[in-house]
Amino acid sequence: MNETEQLLEQVADRVRDSACGHGRVLPAPLGSGEIARAEGILGFALPPLLAGLYTRIGDGGFGPERGLLPLRQTVRTYEAQRRSGWRWPEGVLPIADFGCGMYVCVDCRSETAQVPLFDPNPGEPDLAWSIDTPSLAGWLRGWLDGTAWFCEESALGEESDLELAPWDEFRSRI
């Protein structure tokens, strides 16, 4: 079993345990045809790990905070943001809504599926982008083991002022 398969199994176990404990029913996993349709609309491929989350675990509703967005909502949000005044980078897919306009994204053109964070609250497009995690796998591991900044049990705690590195690469992608 490779690293991606192991991570998908760990996420599936966490989701299954969480859903059972709360009586929630998650959306069914998507078929490969639905992934292909979304990729056709977007004009780029989803990273294998992200596609695996949608095809093996479910169409969103699991993960940190409010969970991953359903794929159709992800595509609609990407298209809307690309037309917005926020200079949304090409190939950067919003995968989770963290509230207050903040989106966790995946850079689908990055070899590691880098995870930028979009936060429009500073009010300045050049300040809206930062690097959350160097990879989608790392982002998921942080959620699974409770060490990510967004986890309640994180060592950062509520009182920490989160300082993420700016994502300067976004300028070359708009």
Image (cartoon, rainbow, N blue to C red):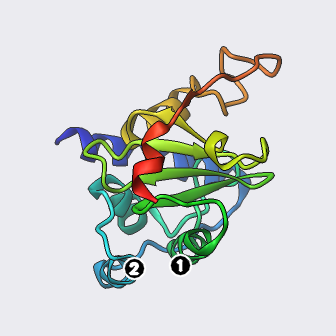
Q: Where in the figure is residue 124, as x and y percent of width and height?
A: 72, 46
- The quarter of the picture where residue 150 lies is top right
- 3, above or below 51, in the image: above
Amino acid identity at mark 1: Arg
Q: Is residue 122 above or below residue 47?
A: above
Q: The N terminus appears in which quarter of the rendering?
A: top left
Q: Nearer the viewer, residue 60 or 20?
A: 60
Quadrant in the picture for residue 66: bottom right
* 148 to the left or right of 99: left
Q: Is residue 103 left or right of residue 31?
A: right
Would you say residue 12 is visible in this rendering? no
Q: CA distance from mark 1 to mark 2?
A: 7 Å
Name the residue type under label 2: Ala
- Depth check: 93 or 28 in front? 93
The residue lying at 35 percent from left, 48 percent from top is 8
Which class describes the residues within 10 Å of circle 2: few (<14), some (14-19), or many (20+)? some
Give the residue at x 57% y 23%.
Answer: 147
Query: Which mark, residue 72?
Result: 1
Q: Are marks 1 and 2 in contact (CB under 8 Å)?
A: yes
Task: Depth check: give the residue in front, 15 or 140.
Answer: 140
